């Protein structure tokens, strides 16, 4: 009895077995939670990407067809209007005031601006070429920031600039968001990012990713 009693007790004592199962299952559960969190983050970034894409795409469409929002009906690009004249022609402050005014309404400026809006809108919406879009978008936002020149308290004519923030306006926020979307490869979820990355030219040139 003294020999078999410990064996009988160990066979009926299930706590060690229970602990072994917990040691295996807990890491699995933690991994599942972590995977779910990563998936949620991917969809959040993807949603931000699509919304940003629509911002640029809508700007292109409204300036092209004149939907009556920022661009009046009948004043669209296809109607002979200039997408840059309204903005650049009214620059009234900053170190590049005269330069921007000279660009207003120029054919090359209209085409470059509109192609930039279209390219950014399509790239962000589809989730492709986000690194290139981040670079081009940051340059565009920087130029628009300089055109509005938020640090100024007064315009060239002495009137109040009505600047809401001397540095962090929406152009800077947009630029940072574009860079973040490119860094996290936000086109892989709800987009064509993974398919785009398989093209040989994209694999060979990482800046196209």
Image: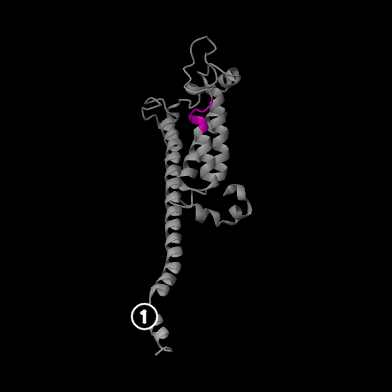
Residue sticking out furthest to the front: 2
- Residue at 49% over, 16% down: 161
Regarding residue 130, the answer to whether it shows in the image is yes
Regarding residue 129, the answer to whether it shows in the image is no
Magenta stretch contains residue 169: yes
Residue 36, quarter of the rendered image: bottom left
Tell which of 116 and 1 is nearer to you.
1
Horizontal side, residue 181 vs residue 9: left or right: right
Magenta stretch contains residue 72: no
Q: Which residues fall within the magenta stretch?
A: 167-172
Q: In the image, residue 46 lies at what x, y percent?
A: 44, 47
- Residue at 63% over, 51% down: 205
Residue 71, quarter of the rendered image: top left
Tell which of 115 and 172 is nearer to you.
172
Q: Quadrant of the N terminus?
A: bottom left
Mark 1: secondary structure: helix
Asked which colour scheme the image uses, the reply is one colour
Q: In the image, residue 188 lies at what x, y percent?
A: 48, 52
Tell me the crowding category of disc 1: few under 14, some 14 to 19, or many 20 or more residues within 10 angstroms, Cα based: few
Residue sticking out furthest to the top: 158
Tell which of 122 and 177 is nearer to you.
177
Task: State the residue position of label 1.
Answer: 12
């Amino acid at each position: 009895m003294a020999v078999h009693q410990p064996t009988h007790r160990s066979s009926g004592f299930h706590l060690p077995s229970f602990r072994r199962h917990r040691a295996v299952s807990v890491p699995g559960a933690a991994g599942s939670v972590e995977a779910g969190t990563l998936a949620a983050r991917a969809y959040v970034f993807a949603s931000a990407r699509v919304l940003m894409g629509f911002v640029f795409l809508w700007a292109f469409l409204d300036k092209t067809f004149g939907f009556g929002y920022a661009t009046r009906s009948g004043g669209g690009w296809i109607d002979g209007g200039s997408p840059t004249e309204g903005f650049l022609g009214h620059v009234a402050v900053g170190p590049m005031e005269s330069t921007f005014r000279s660009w207003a309404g120029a054919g090359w400026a209209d085409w470059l601006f509109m192609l930039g809006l279209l390219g950014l809108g399509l790239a962000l919406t589809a989730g492709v070429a986000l690194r290139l879009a981040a670079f081009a978008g940051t340059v565009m936002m920087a130029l628009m920031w300089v055109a509005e020149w938020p640090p100024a308290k007064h315009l060239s004519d002495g009137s109040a600039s009505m600047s809401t923030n001397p540095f962090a306006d929406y152009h800077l926020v947009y630029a940072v968001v574009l860079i973040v979307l490119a860094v996290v490869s936000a086109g892989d979820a709800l987009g064509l990012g993974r398919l785009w990355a398989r093209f040989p030219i994209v694999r060979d040139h990482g800046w196209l990713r």
